[in-house]
Amino acid sequence: MTASVLEFAEVAKNYGSLRPLRVAHLRVEAGQRTAIIGFDRPGAEVFVNLATGATLPDSGTVTIFDRATSAITDSSDWLTTVDRVGIVSERAVLLEQLTVVQNLAMPFTLDIEPPPPPERVRAEALAQEVGVAVSQWTRPLAGLDPLAAMRVRLGRAVALDPAVVLLEHASASLSREASGEFAASVRAVADRRQLAVIALTADESFARGIGATVLAHEPATGRLKESGRGWFGRRR
């Protein structure tokens, strides 16, 4: 069996909603791409926090890289684990007054005005990999269109060579055309790096565009079923 990157087993977490977040069973293996439809923004945030061990489930078990998150009690151990996870989310902090290259250099150095040559080269390589146009590299992030800004977030997510990338409603602010272009960027980066990808989204065409298996989440039970299939695997 391929190594597990992330696994949820009978997980429940109260977070102030009408019902707790529930995930009956989810297993994502190395290099696998999975999209889940059915989490709103608060629910997606809770899912990501559970996946990274930033919060623990009220019941059930979350396992990341074959370790239960409840067993990661040392802060340095937790940070080492989190470094293997990239997160594409509008919650992730970027500095809008800084340029694309400066933002992408930040995972490598705090000396960003300007970045030292080796870190600048690494940042420029990231910008090119995720599809940011060369003409935008020296622009402040605040002046970018939504697609370019989301590509910068993807670059930041993969900067430290994670094993898995979590996308938290990453296409929500994009037009249909831009969403398709961003999906192609995610797919190309995942192919190149052999990444596992877990996308929490309401956009099934985006999910299909990244090459994911699309699962629909049933909030009351936490069950996940393949989108477009009945409970017994029959295509509707």
Image: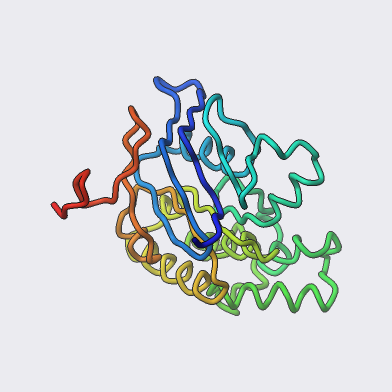
Please tell me which residue is depicted at 22% across the width and 43% down the height of the picture.
Answer: 231
Please tell me which residue is depicted at 84% across the width and 59% down the height of the picture.
Answer: 110
39 or 223: nearer the viewer: 223
Quadrant position of residue 162: bottom right
77 or 178: nearer the viewer: 77
Taking the view exactly as shown, the residue that stands out farthest to the left is: 236
Please tell me which residue is depicted at 50% across the width and 23% down the height of the picture.
Answer: 14
Image coords of residue 44 (percent x, y):
47, 40
Colour theme: rainbow
Task: Give the answer, above or below, for where 110 lies relative to 21.
Answer: below
Image coords of residue 107 (percent x, y):
75, 61
Q: Is residue 153 left or right of residue 167?
A: right
Image coords of residue 171 (percent x, y):
42, 55
Task: Give the answer, above or below, for where 222 lies relative to 182.
Answer: above
Taking the view exactly as shown, the residue that stands out farthest to the front is: 1
Please tell me which residue is depicted at 82% across the width and 70% down the height of the picture.
Answer: 115
Tally of numbered discs: 0
Q: Is residue 62 left or right of residue 212?
A: right
52 or 87: nearer the viewer: 52
Image coords of residue 48 (percent x, y):
55, 42
9 or 197: nearer the viewer: 9
